[in-house]
Amino acid sequence: MIKSFASLACAACAFVPSVSAQWQAAFELQDASHLVALPVAHDPSEELIVATEDPPVVLVLDLASGVVKRTLTRPTWQPSGAGRPIALDREGHLFVVDVATTTITEFDRDDRFVRTFPVDLSCAGDPTGSGIRDLEVTRRGTLVALGGWVSGSINWLLEIDPETGETIHCCDIDAAVGSSFEGARLALDADDVAYVTEYAPDAGPKRVAVIDVPSCTLIELVATPAVDTNLVDVEVTPGGAMVVGDNHGGFTWLSDASRQQFCALGSCTGSYANHATFTVSHGMLYAGAAAGCGTGSPRIDVLPLECGASPVRSIEVPLPSIGAVRVRHH
């Protein structure tokens, strides 16, 4: 059943295009980023992890200072126009997807290389499709991967054993929903239920599919305020509220715990734009923003999870684009 939502009046926001074309082909790592706006207190052991598609790297930054601590890459990683999903387990191990080679690389909590293993997509029925779009880690330590997102292809969720690389469960999202559902991003709630955002060009409100992965059962479809646009990232707070990114509209939507009422955190008419990827940590939203709206560089905006909130801090990131972001607590 599709849930309804309250009508919301909100100003339109201009779409901010990518700035990757403005970057030089050669990638030169900067040793620090720049902090603007108001400071926010952070534990000195906390780290901000940011991935990009091209060049194929992951940066680990000190969250308090914004200084780049480490750059992670592997010889087999390739540039990709399809993102570089990352995920953290409860021990702080980092898992990085290389979409081009359909592999997952594991680093330990000190970012030392552990191993790389291939992901078998044959159970999804579309092994030559667009590959893995997003990745999360369950409380049990297994990996859940979202894939598909090509019109006319199968869209799927895989649960993977990170110790063996073997597929535990394979879920056809289209079959669960009852129609073609082009999944964009993935989140897991406290019970490891999957939330998949809808990326589709069709008119009408975009939805979030709530799915039990082991049984491949649709629990509900949640309608969002995003209309005639595309949904991107999604996060679920410990209290059950949902944060959804609206790619072309430029808004980031926050729901109540029932997911029946939504409000806007803001738009690029405020002080940030196009939060296509984000994560939630300790009641704050860490959102990757495209260049524009008063800044010339991609950045991570830090916002409280409150209606109408604006960033209390922004961290410029020395990358041409931001494909994924996570916060790690040591």
Image (cartoon, grey):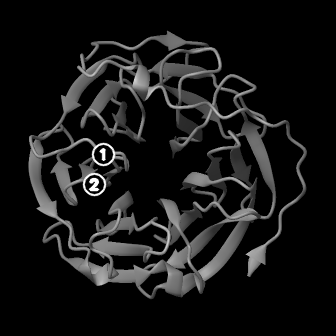
Apparent side of residue 36 relative to residue 244 in the rendered image (left or right): left
Give the camera-side residue of 29 and 164. 29
Q: Could you tell me if the residues under marks 1 and 2 are in contact, i.e. CB atoms within 8 Å?
A: yes
Q: For numbered disc 2, what is the local secondary structure?
A: loop
**How packed is label 2: few (under 14 Cα within 10 Å), some, or many (20 or more)?**
many
Image quadrant for the C terminus? top left
Image quadrant for the N terminus? bottom right
Question: What residue is shown at x 24% (from left), y 80% (from top)?
Answer: 122
Q: Which residue is mark 1?
A: 80
- Residue 260 locus on image (x, y percent): 79, 64
Give the camera-side residue of 267 and 249. 249
Q: How much space separates mark 1 and mark 2, taking CA atoms? A: 7 Å
Q: Amino acid at mark 2?
A: Val
Q: Which residue is mark 2?
A: 99
Does 146 sit above or below residue 275?
below
Q: Amino acid at mark 1?
A: Ser
